[in-house]
Structures are given as structure tokens and as C-alpha cells.
Image (cartoon, grey):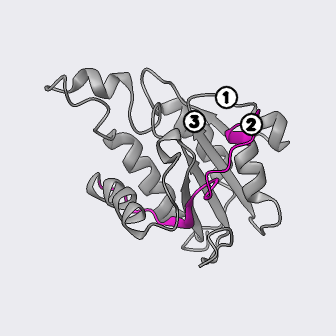
Amino acid sequence: MDYNKDILPVKYLVFLDIDGVFTSARVQYASANPRDLWNKFDPTAIEFMNKIHDRVDGVYFMLISTWKDHLITSDVMLEHWIISSFRNAGFRGEFNRPWKTNPDNHYERGKTRAHEIKDYLDGRQIKDYIIFDDTDYEFDRILGVRRHIKTDSENGLLMKHMKNAMSIIGTWDTRDGT
């Protein structure tokens, strides 16, 4: 299988970081067991991504987090482990295939997540996309469009981030045609 080519009919992509979106210092601090380091997903972030999945026709999700680095895309067990982690947290969205940017783990000096997304999007027929990340890798400058929702590393996905995201996603095709 060529993991550099999509196998799904993708209209829209949601690029996901993990730290600062699904996990945060707030979620960690609330944990009863201090040894549960960054191992719980924020239920509010999960539900918001489910809202996107339930509403938008042709939307798929992709990981951009460093948590994906050095994981082999073609390893079916790793793919299963990643998707199971999200499913066990209540996530209903569908991951794209490949399920992460930079599927071959090739790193060039000076390349950032913004470059990985740009490289991924080049030559693909994607209508639109959005990026959830608590770090700004100069997404707007490198990608030439404002699609970055900069979440809060301490508190994760906040109401203002969800409203900002909906202002972008609100123009996407809906499942019910409205």
C-alpha cells in the first residue's frame, strides 16, 4: 500500500496535535493519580471533535503531534493502537489514511509541522482544512491561509477556540445538506 496516497474520499481535514488539545496541564492536574502523566484525553475536546465529525460531510482527522514521530505508518498494529486510544476516549471521528503527516518519518533540517502539512496538502484535492495545535509553527505564513486554532498548553481547547473553529468549519458541507 502506498501510504503517500489517500485511500479515502477526503473533502476536509482536521489536523490534530495531542498535547495542548486533548491533554493539558489542567487535565493532568485534575487527575487523582499523579503518575497518570498525560494519559487522559479531555472529554470536552473529544466531544467537540465528535461535533465536527457528526456535522461535516467528508471530514477526516490526521495527527500532527510529535507523539506520531518515529511510528511507522504501514504498521497496522501501531495504527490500531493510535485509533484505539482515541476510540477508548469516546472519539467517533474517522482518521485519514495515512493517519499522520510525514508518514515515512523523513526529517529535513528546518522543517516544521507547517511544512509537513504543506507537503501533505500539495497535489491533493482537499476543499479545506483546520489545524488544532497549542504551538504556532508559522502555519499562517507557510500555508498562506489562516486555519490554525492556537489552543492553550495549560488549559487545552477552550470555548474561544471552539467558536473560532466553528467560524471556519461553518462553511463546510454538512451531512444533512444545510
Residue 120 sits in quarter = bottom right
Classified by dominant secondary structure, the portion drawn in magenta counts as: loop
Q: Which of 39 and 174 is in front in this view?
A: 39
Residue drawn where x is 76% and y is 58% of the image: 121
Residue 18 picture location, percent across and down: 46, 40
**Labels 3 and 2 touching (C-beta < 8 A):** yes
Q: Is residue 146 left or right of residue 162?
A: right
Judge whether 177 appears above or below 69 on screen. below
Say which element carries label 2: helix
Task: Classify the position of the N terminus by image quarter.
Answer: bottom right
- Image disc number at residue 155: none
Task: Classify the position of the C terminus by image quarter.
Answer: bottom right
**Labels 1 and 3 touching (C-beta < 8 A):** yes
Q: What stretch is highlighted in magenta?
A: 90-114
> Mark 1 is on which residue type?
Asp
Judge whether 71 appears above or below 165 on screen. below
> Mark 2 is on which residue type?
Phe
User: Which residue is the site of mark 2?
Assistant: 139
Q: Nearer the viewer, residue 124 or 2?
A: 2
- Image disc number at residue 133: 3
Say which element carries label 1: loop
